[in-house]
Amino acid sequence: MSSTRTAVRTHWVAIRAMLVFTLVLGVGYTIVVTGIGQVILPAQANGSTMTDASGEVVGSALIGQSFADADGNPLPEWFQPRPSAAGDGYDGDASSGSNWGPENADLIAAIEERTAQVAEFNRVDEADVPADAVTASASGLDPHISPEYALLQVARVAGERGLPESELRELVESRIQARDLGYLGEPTVNVLQLNLALAELG
């Protein structure tokens, strides 16, 4: 009888401890951390979402997206991102790179094909096409391109939109993000941010 009471008491203590820790760590901690995030870093806590001029969410500053038609053809009136190997392109559920090495025949063929396509699309020499225009990032989700690739596209976008090239060049240059802490990484341009600014020009 005594051992039965002891077992019941032990189980009841364990159940109460589990309930208390579930409330404190599972609910309370989550509420506190979420609250701190909303107060200190609200944009980051909500996914770094970006909105258009009407206030509609159109994407995230952290995940690239395609600017193409229903058949996957790049739209010439928009700045284009780098290629993506994530699913059908920039699929957050299928983040990955191709994992092909630099001597892989498939990678070499893909780069050659992309180089020819980018050069033709932008009416430039193949030698002028930067590396990020023809290679995917390791995650397949990189929202950035190099300033060189963004500037390469200025003439095409300006021609499609009937805008002065000098105006678009200034727009691109105003969107160049410097190296982190002044020395880490390379300068970049966020394609979605650039295209949202482009949309505001008309």
Image (tube, rainbow, N blue to C red):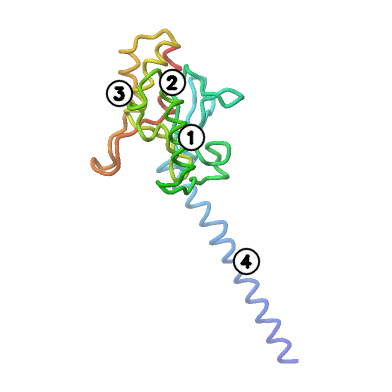
User: Which label's residue is closer to the chain start, 2 or 1?
Assistant: 1
Residue at disc 4, secondary structure: helix
Using the numbered discs, state the Cα–Cα distance from disc 4 to disc 1 in whole angstroms. 37 Å
Q: Is residue 45 visible?
A: yes
Q: Residue at x 34, y 19 (%)?
A: 171
Which marked residue is nearer to the observer: mark 1 or mark 3? 3
Which marked residue is nearer to the observer: mark 4 or mark 3? 3
Residue at disc 2, secondary structure: helix
Q: Which residue is mark 3?
A: 173
Using the numbered discs, state the Cα–Cα distance from disc 2 to disc 1 in whole angstroms. 30 Å
Which marked residue is nearer to the observer: mark 2 or mark 4? 2
Find the residue positioned furthest to the bottom.
Answer: 2
Query: Would you call the spot at circle 2 few (<14 residues within 10 Å), some (14-19), or many (20 or more)?
Result: few
Q: Which residue is mark 1?
A: 60
Q: Which residue is mark 4?
A: 19
Q: Residue at x 30, y 23 (%)?
A: 173
Which marked residue is nearer to the observer: mark 2 or mark 1? 2
Residue at disc 3, secondary structure: helix
Callout 4 amino acid: Leu
User: Which label's residue is closer to the chain start, 4 or 3?
Assistant: 4
